[in-house]
Structures are given as C-alpha cells and as structure tokens.
Image (cartoon, helix red, strand yellow):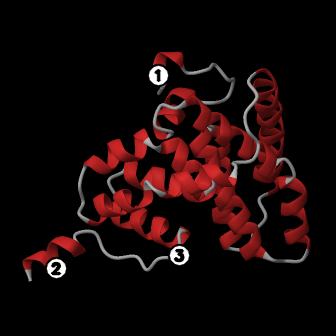
Amino acid sequence: FPVTIHMAPVIPGLDTETALRRAGGKLKVYERLLSHFKADFGDFSARFEEVCTHGDWESARRLAHTLKGLAGTVGSELIEGQATILEQSCKTGFRDEEVVQSLKVALHSQIEVIAGYLATSPVEGVVSSTSSVSGMQFVPRLKELLMSGDSDAFDWWATHAQAFSGVLGPVVFERIARNIDSFNFDAALNHLCNSVGEVPESVGARDQERGS
C-alpha cells in the first residue's frame, strides 16, 4: 500500500517527501528509481568527459538534461540545479569547469549515499517481463483520461505508479510524472504514446470528436 509522507525514508541530500509524492506515495517505486539513478549515473563523469573531448556538445547537453530530470525525480535539488546550469553551458559550447567539478563531487557523494541506503533496503534491479505485461493493462485508461483532460488521471497514475515504472522505464516515467503533476496532460500524453509506439492525440481531442 502507498506509504504516507511521514514514512518517507531519511536519505541525506534528498527531498524524499516530494519524491515519494511523485512516485504515487509508493516506496518500492521510489526505491526502484533510486536504483536506476545509481546505475545510470555512476559513470556520468567518464561519459561526460568522453563526449566533451570529442567536442560533441549536443551529447553533453543530453547527458546533463537526463541527469537533471532524474535528479529532480529522486529529490536531489542540488544536483538538479547544477545539471541545469551545465545543460545551459553545453548549449553554447562552453565548459564551465567550476560547475563540472562541483557536479562531479556532488554526484559521487550522492550516489554513495544512495548505495548505502539501498544496501539496507534491497530492490529489484530489473523489472520482469511479467510485470511489464501486467502494467500495460493500465495504459489505455491513463491515455483516455489524459486525452479528455480528466483530473482522475492524477489518481490513476498514483494508484498504478509501480506498474507504470516497470512499463515505461525511469526516464519516461519521470517525464510523465512531472507533466501530470503540473497539469500538462498534453505533454504527458505525448510521452506515454511515444513510449508504447502509438500516435499521440491532443488533450480534449475525444471531446471535440464527440461534439462534431
């Protein structure tokens, strides 16, 4: 069952209360996102240095952008903010060495803290195919709610957050969660449809069809 916010784990450097809300109040969903964050960004520094060495600023920007998104999802405002600055500097092809070094230190420290937490609260590193298949059953209803701009999308997303995290993966899950949280149903719908290989429709499209 969903955990209440006062049950949020204490993890130094992370706003776990806010992060849990975005995960529908489900601790296992949040822990899976933490596990993905640790696995995906443990080698961020090496990957960033590699693309910068080749002058590939677009790849550097994408790395910073992805880090920014997932850092915000797990509740690291510090890393999210630093990654935002880094993303902007990459757009201009300028390497802000102070920001780069500060981010590397903060990221390394945060991942160590996350690893320590996960060591005492093991999570599934890989979502089974059975979980993914069962999670797909909730997608059509979410799509319908987003298309019609129905506020019930909030409850449906929160109730089935764990299933959605298995189907969508951490990056898409984070994008949809943020857009639903900010009432941007159109963007959430686009991400959802793209992730499952469907052509996205605009919010309210179904209502327009019924009225025509």
Q: Is residue 69 visible?
A: no
Q: Which mark is first along the chain, 3 or 2?
A: 3
Cα gap from disc 2 to disc 3, whole angstroms: 23 Å
Residue at figure coordinates x 81%, y 77% from the top left: 56
Residue type at the position of mark 3: Gly
Disc 1, disc 2: CB below 8 Å? no
Instruction: Report which residue position mark 1 lands on.
Output: 5
Q: Which mark is first along the chain, 2 or 1?
A: 1
Question: In the image, which is nearer the foreground, mark 1 or mark 2?
Answer: 2
Residue type at the position of mark 1: Ile
Instruction: Report which residue position mark 3 lands on.
Output: 197
| Element carrying mark 1 | helix
Question: In the image, which is nearer the foreground, mark 1 or mark 3?
Answer: 3
Q: Residues within 10 Å of mark 1 (few under 14, many from 20)?
A: some
Residue at figure coordinates x 77%, y 46% from the top left: 103
Disc 1, disc 3: CB below 8 Å? no
Q: Residues within 10 Å of mark 3 (few under 14, many from 20)?
A: few
Residue type at the position of mark 2: Glu
Residue 43: % across, % down: 87, 52
Q: In the image, 158: left or right of 40?
A: left
When the figure is inspected, residue 111 is found, relative to residue 174, above or below; the finding is: above
Residue at figure coordinates x 43%, y 54% from the top left: 138
Closest to the observer, 44 or 143: 143
The label number, if any, that marks residue 209 in the structure image: 2
